Amino acid sequence: MSTGRDTPGVIAPPPLIYLGFLLAAAGLGWLLGEPSLGLPDQVRRIAAVVLVAVGLMLDGAAAFAFRRAGTAVEPWKPSTAIVAAGPYRFSRNPIYVGFTLAFIGFAVGMDSPMALAFLFPCLIVVDRLVIAREERYLDAKFGEAWRAYARTVRRWL
């Protein structure tokens, strides 16, 4: 929650949350000698590249929409506008959808079932300790304008 400043008070920068879960899964998978996903190497590499590229493109489009609206992308900075253009027409959180796609791509590229399993707790942390805080902040800051947007656009997809 907000610490009295004009920010949502997220627990950590979201990219670091995703990276932390990915690294923890890689470390645990290495320690336990996890099995392979069982995909042929060529299929795995292509899937990984496509997922990471699509995730990063979605993140870029979402960041561009924020910049175009003149508001900060970073959740530890004040928001000055509700962004409802670009990918925000379809998802209230396209950046996190992009991070999730990239995470899956890295997990596939690493051939790591453990990383795929760690995605679920990662998403719970992001949903509860980042998105929920951001949405409370936006509701408090923008009121009915935020609520109208939230009623018409899904949180994730």
Image (cartoon, helix red, strand yellow):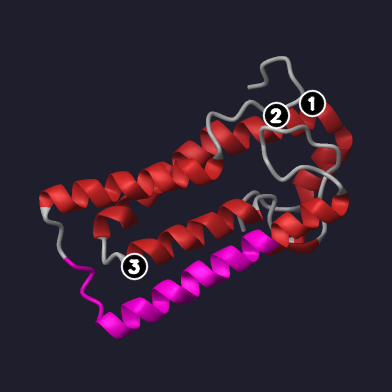
**Residue type at the position of mark 2:** Arg
Does residue 7 appear in the picture of this structure? yes
The reply to whether dot 1 and dot 2 touch (C-beta < 8 Å) is yes
Using residue 148 as the reference point, say whether residue 3 is left or right of it: left
In the image, residue 127 sits, relative to residue 60, either above or below, namely above
In the displayed structure, 5 sits above or below 127; it is above
Q: Single out the mark in the foreground, 3 or 2.
A: 3
Going from N to C along the chain, the mark reached first, 1 or 3, is 3
Total numbered labels: 3
Helix, strand or loop under label 3 = helix
Q: Which residue is mark 3?
A: 108
* Residue placed under numbered mark 2 in the picture: 136
Q: How far across and down, in percent of the image, does residue 99 sit?
A: 53, 55
Give the vertical position of 108 relative to 114 (above or below): below
Residue at the image point whose x is 36% and y is 50% from the top: 22
Measuring from the top left, give residue 6's x and y in whole percent: 77, 24
Mark 1 vs mark 3: in front:
3
User: Depth check: 54 or 147 in front?
Assistant: 54
Amino acid type for the residue under numbered disc 3: Val
Identity of the residue drawn at 80% across and 38% down = 147
Magenta residue span: 36-60
Q: Which quarter of the figure has residue 77?
A: top right
| Most frequent secondary structure within the magenta stretch | helix
**10 in magenta:** no
Q: Secondary structure at mark 1?
A: helix
Instruction: Please say if the residues under marks 1 and 3 sit with CB atoms less than 8 Å apart.
Output: no
- Distance of mark 1 from mark 3, alpha carbons? 39 Å
State whether residue 88 appears in this view. Answer: no
Query: The N terminus appears in which quarter of the rendering?
Result: top right
Give the residue type at disc 1: Ala
Measured in 3D between alpha carbons, the distance from the residue under mark 1 to the one under mark 2, in whole angstroms, is 6 Å
Residue 140 is tagged as 1
